[in-house]
């Protein structure tokens, strides 16, 4: 009688577990999806690639925008107006190509941008961020818009870091499972031990 009950209940438990595995939390599926990482990485990389390229084309206009904040000395305006966009361009290209370290560079740049924009907002500076084009440089004050935009991109960077860490954990777990399977196979069949292959070669 007990065996009959167990055989009836056990499939239901397995079915429930199967449904839970097939329908995980939507947010978890979104974060762990490789497409999430690829799409956000491509978008962020393209934004920085474009922003760096536009500012490199007209570095003089960007130098004028930097000078309005009063943070960088006049002597360093020209190097900043060229070096910063070049770093943005290379970091964006590196992120698109999924090169190591590019995401950390972009995160650092965004933190700096948010700090500078926050400084401009707190001091009520009537300047523009000059983040992209000449049209933005000559437009009305949009520091708050640029500030929130950079915060949104920082959230995207954190999502990339989280997606990447989950991917590493999954690969580590899968490797452990494969290693455990191989160990069990080696215990059952000693001739399959990795060290024993040299005796057969």
Image: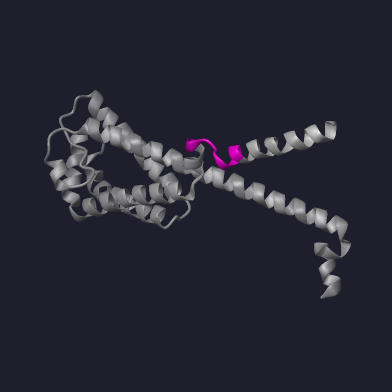
x and y percentages locating residue 113 in the rendered image: 31, 37
Camera-side residue of 114 and 9: 9
Give the position of the N terminus as an image quadrant: top right
Residue positioned 73% across, 33% down in the render:
9
Residue 13 located left or right of residue 31? right
- Magenta-drawn stretch contains 35: no
Residue positioned 76% across, 51% down in the render:
180
Number of numbered discs present?
0
Relative to 198, does residue 133 appear above or below in the rendering?
above
Camera-side residue of 172 and 100: 172
Which residue is the extreme one toward the bottom?
A: 201
Quadrant position of residue 69: top left
Camera-side residue of 54 and 179: 179
x and y percentages locating residue 53 in the rendered image: 25, 54
Question: Start and end of the magenta stretch?
Answer: 19-27
Residue positioned 31% across, 49% down in the render:
48
Camera-side residue of 49 and 55: 49
Residue 117 located left or right of residue 182? left
x and y percentages locating residue 34 in the rendered image: 48, 50
- Magenta-drawn stretch contains 20: yes
Residue positioned 32% across, 34% down in the render:
114
Give the position of the C terminus as an image quadrant: bottom right
Residue 30 located left or right of residue 46? right
Q: Main secondary structure of the magenta part?
A: helix
Relative to 18, does residue 89 appear above or below in the rendering?
below
Residue 159 located left or right of residue 82? right
Quadrant position of residue 126: top left
x and y percentages locating residue 75 in the rendered image: 23, 44
């Amino acid at each position: 009688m007990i065996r009959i009950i167990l055989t009836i209940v056990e499939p239901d438990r397995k079915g429930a577990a199967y449904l839970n595995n097939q329908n995980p939390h939507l947010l978890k599926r979104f974060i762990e999806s490789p497409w999430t990482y690829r799409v956000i990485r491509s978008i962020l990389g393209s934004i920085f690639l474009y922003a760096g390229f536009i500012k490199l084309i007209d570095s003089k206009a960007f130098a004028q925008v930097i000078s309005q904040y009063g943070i960088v000395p006049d002597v360093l305006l020209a190097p900043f107006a060229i070096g910063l966009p070049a770093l943005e361009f290379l970091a964006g290209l590196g992120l698109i190509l999924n090169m190591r370290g590019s995401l950390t560079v972009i995160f650092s740049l965004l933190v700096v941008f948010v700090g500078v924009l926050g400084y401009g907002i707190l001091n009520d500076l009537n300047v523009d961020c000059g983040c992209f084009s000449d049209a933005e440089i000559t437009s009305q004050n949009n520091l708050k818009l640029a500030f929130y935009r950079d915060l949104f991109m920082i959230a995207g960077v954190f999502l990339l870091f989280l997606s990447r860490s989950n991917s590493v954990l999954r690969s580590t777990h899968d490797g452990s499972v494969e290693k455990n399977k191989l160990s069990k196979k080696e215990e059952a069949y000693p001739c399959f031990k990795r060290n024993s292959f040299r005796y057969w070669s």
